[in-house]
Image (cartoon, helix red, strand yellow):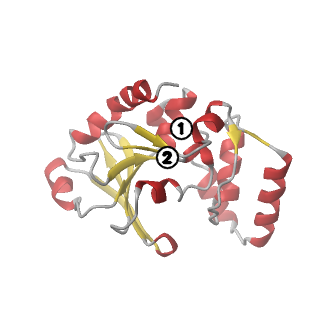
Amino acid sequence: MDTTSLGANLRVYTDRLEANGIKFGQGIYLAGGAIRRAICGHKIEEGDFDIYITNNWKFEEAQKAYGWELVGSKERPTLKMMSYDFNIDNLRVQLHYLPAEMTLQSILETFDFTCCQFAYDGDKVHYLSTALEDTRNMRLRLTGTFSRFTVARSFRFLGMGFGATKSVLEELQKRAAAEVLSPAAVAEETKKGFS
């Protein structure tokens, strides 16, 4: 897939976000699922839009000027990240504030599956080595990152038609046995649907 045309498809949504005060580039990236949905031909707007911020841009001014609806916020200490959930122009948006030293490479490495290792800077789609091939082939592959939601997220991807090798399933099983996931945590992650 030509990532230039992929960027043009995403531009429809990033233009809406930019019209509401979010300017991509220079440390502000759309990353993860929205790009995966575009590659897989799913409706891009049916999931959330994860925006990673590594510069000193503050959302409060844009929130006031454009009337963003704050839905929630949470601190993620293991990633040294603060996240804010908004409804912006009828899109579910998560703003993730990361330390300034985080590079584009390190943002991509925070994802637990290769099919999410994408970032769009307003001009170009960036991705790690096997991300594009794995996503095109609907192949579920773990990265070195693992969170308490990885197992639950794997159910979502399998439900979307991603395939997993026996070794990936065994690794998920092994890690699931080591994790203590509450039924509520699994339900929260899986209720997001298959987008």
**Residue labelled with disc 2:** 32
Q: Is mark 2 on a helix, strand or loop?
A: loop
Quarter of the C terminus within the rendering: top right
The number of callouts visible is 2
Q: Residue at x 52, y 35 (%)?
A: 37
| Kind of residue at badge 2 | Gly
Residue 40, x across and y down, in percent: 57, 30
- Front residue of 11/127: it is 127
For the residues labelled 1 and 2, the Cα–Cα distance comes to 6 Å
Q: What element carries label 1?
A: helix
Q: Are marks 1 and 2 in contact (CB under 8 Å)?
A: yes
Residue 63, x across and y down, in percent: 21, 55
Horizontal side of residue 111 vs 12, given as left or right: right
**Mark 2 surroundings: few (<14), some (14-19) or many (≥20) residues within 10 A:** many
* Residue 36 numbered tag: 1
- Front residue of 35/5: it is 5
Question: Does 176 sit above or below residue 163?
Answer: below
Question: Does 94 sit above or below residue 46?
Answer: below
